[in-house]
Amino acid sequence: MYLSREEERIYNGDFGWAYEISMKILVKLGDLYGAERLIPIESAHVSGVSYKTIGNAPIEFLEALVASNGRVKVDSTINPSSIDFEDPSFNLLPGELIEKQKRIIDLYSALGIEPTLTCTPYYIRQIRTGSHVSWAESSAVIYANSILGAWTNREGGPSALASALIGKTPDYGLHRPENRRASVLVKVEADILSESDYGSLGIYLGKVLGDSIPVIQGKIVREECFLKQMGAAMATSGMVSMFYLNGLDGVSQIEEKITVDNRDIRRSYEELSSAFEKPDLIFIGCPHCSLEEIKSISSLLYGRRIKEDIKLWVCTPRFIRSRAYDCVKVIEASGGRVISDTCAVVTWLRELGVETLVTNSAKTAYYAPLMSNVKAILLPLKKCIEVALREV
Ligand code: F3S
């Protein structure tokens, strides 16, 4: 891979170890995927923040980056952690876990990364269409490429962090126009009406598409929260990092075609629901909720009370939470919690007394049983709220 004089000096350690190791990570990746050069990025989004999912191993690496004076070169954000430090529900967790999680966040902050602690950084920052970015977090990657029109590969935590420190990424994959062409035509004949239907569709498509880029046609509604759920789910069961919707030019030349009908969606729901018993937790907010979603949830809960023995968590970026004061008051008056900086997948659910959850997110229904050994039920938002409000 071609390096400019300055990039070579970084590679050789002239600016310190933090930049040297970051450059070496990027060059290794670039060589592996046939990139010819590095290109500048406008932002980075780094995963690998929850102590539950990363454990102790990366702490030493982050400490070494800080000790050698590493600072990010571009606007950088981080994924959720394992704890909302401002919510008393998490006080149940052992002190050691809380300390370790604090340490990880402090280290990222010391590198100059804003502790946004959300998987929906696009609700905090405007992303320019056509801008190159380096994002980890698969749900944000597919959203950036497909809905925001930004260009990013599906980075891992270390490569996104390396890009943040250098301000560049290797020019390969979805940074190249020739790799952003759709290769599969998906015709949706199923009746998909709710965000959980879109999530089920996404889980089905992720399994059949692998890492292909689809153009999706048929009964699709361009509603942001539907597309967010579909994209997050496709990136969960598969490696899909981008999709197009109806109306793309050149569709007639696509040879591979898939049709999705009601049976496929029903099967997907069945596979995602591992329990039929009363839940301990209703979880909304995977990916983290937008202001619009918070408003819908608060209107469903207005003047109502959720059952004493059921927890309701609504997860949203702290930035959105601070702008939704009245809605937060309504949700919390009903007995629910509006939680930031974490989610039900990356915290310790069992330790918090959860064995079964109901969610409107196909991604959570897919991951929670695997990552937290809990049972899950996938339902549309309105049904989730009904379950919280009445005996089942
Ligand atoms: Fe975000 Fe947690 Fe879902 S990080 S995408 S809410 S699994």
Image (tube, rainbow, N blue to C red):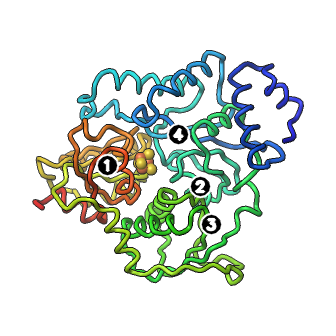
- Measure the alpha-carbon separation of dots 2 and 3: 14 Å
Mark 1 or 4, closer to the camera: 4
Q: Nearer the viewer, mark 2 or mark 4?
A: 4
Q: Which residue is mark 4?
A: 47
Q: SS for tag 1?
A: strand
The disc, 2 or 1, on the residue closer to the chain's N-terminal end is 2
Of callouts 1 and 4, which one flags the residue occurring earlier in the amino acid sequence?
Answer: 4
Q: Which residue type carries mark 1?
A: Val
Identify which residue is drawn at 49% across, 40% down.
Answer: 79
Gap in angstroms between the C-alphas marked 1 and 4: 21 Å
Numbered marks: total: 4
Which mark is drawn over residue 144?
2
Q: Earlier in the sequence, mark 4 or mark 3?
A: 4
Q: Nearer the N terminus, badge 2 or badge 3?
A: 2
User: Residue at image x 29%, y 64%?
Assistant: 379
Classed neighbour count for the residue bearing mark 3: other residues with Cα under 10 Å, few (<14), some (14–19), many (≥20) = many
Residue topped by disc 3: 213
Q: Identify the residue shown where x is 50% and y is 68%.
A: 205
Q: Position of residue 213 (x, y in %)?
A: 62, 66
